[in-house]
Image (cartoon, rainbow, N blue to C red):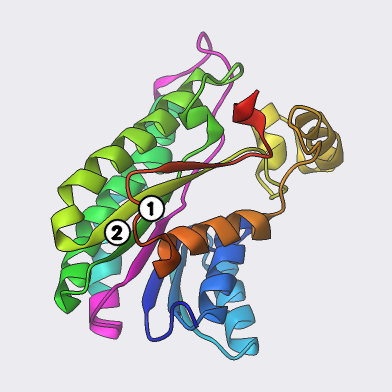
Amino acid sequence: MELADKVAVVTAGGSGIGRATSLRFAEEGAAVAVVDIDGEAAAGTVAAIEAAGGSGSAHAVDCSDSTALKDLFEALDQRYGRLDVLFNHAGIPNPHGIAAIEDADFDRAVGVNLRSGFFATRYALPLFRRTGEGGTIVFTASTAGIVASMTSPLYAMTKHGVVGLVHSLSQVLAEEGIRVNAVCPGPVRTPMLPGFMGKGPEETDWVAEHYGSDNALKRVAQPEEVAEAVLFLAGERSSYITGVPLPVDAGFLAK
């Protein structure tokens, strides 16, 4: 198994891509610490992992809170004593436009989409270094981290920041054998999908149809399809890849 005897942390692991990736990591042999602001959702993912014969732990954490992240990784140190994979997935849609953006909107966007991954990485590094075997860090950026967003400049700003962080960390951590990459999904059918167009969950099908019409494959992704890309970047099949924002976008960026 690709992650046998490894320890992995997945932030925002309670639903969507985070849940699918947590399950996939566990299938490949990792003990998975599932982190989510919704503790019940994190526990649900762990229950699914354990029902399939895997191992995991659930942690209710607001990843925009750096103090909470510090406490989390101290607890993980006590529980596992090491870390091999970190998937910095926490992120949220942001309000559209610029004229109506308030300070609280801006601060929340930066806190969840950018600050969370920075400080999770900071507090995770001592656990990576414990083994002397390196490790892998994967961030979730977005196609909006590579090209312009026509709806939310704030979202694009934070996701471009994630890509910049990945580029920099890949250079800083390479000597320690820690590879750093990002997945850049297009639209994915998750509970957050309608929020990217300012819609409610009752309009998920309409939003999926709208977004799906804008790429070569004419559909949105399923969370499991993005999870496979994360697994690839987290495992040894990508051993010569670092510093890469990998589009998982059905050809959207190829146009």
Q: Position of residue 94 (x, y in %)?
A: 54, 30
31 vs 15: above or below: below
Dot 2: within a 10 Å radius of its alpha carbon, few (fewer than 14), some, or many (20 or more) residues? many
Dot 1: within a 10 Å radius of its alpha carbon, few (fewer than 14), some, or many (20 or more) residues? many
Q: Earlier in the sequence, mark 1 or mark 2?
A: 1
Q: Residue at x 29, y 39 (%)?
A: 167
Q: Position of residue 236 (x, y in %)?
A: 40, 68
Q: Main secondary structure of the magenta part?
A: loop
Q: Is residue 60 visible?
A: no
- Queried whether the magenta region covers residue 217, the answer comes back as no
Q: Residue at x 36, y 77 (%)?
A: 7
Name the residue that disc number 1 marks.
63
> Which one is in front, 97 or 87?
87
Secondary structure of the residue carrying tag 1 is loop
User: Is disc 1 in contact with disc 2, using a CB cutoff of under 8 Å?
Assistant: yes
Q: Amino acid at mark 1?
A: Cys
Q: Amino acid at mark 2?
A: Leu
Q: CA distance from mark 1 to mark 2?
A: 6 Å
> Which one is in front, 220 or 241?
241
Name the residue that disc number 2 marks.
69
Q: Position of residue 189 (x, y in %)?
A: 73, 48
Q: Is residue 213 visible?
A: yes
Q: Position of residue 40 (x, y in %)?
A: 58, 69
Which portion, as a residue range, is magenta? 76-103
**Residue 20 falls left or right of residue 221:** left
> How many numbered dots are placed on residues in this image?
2
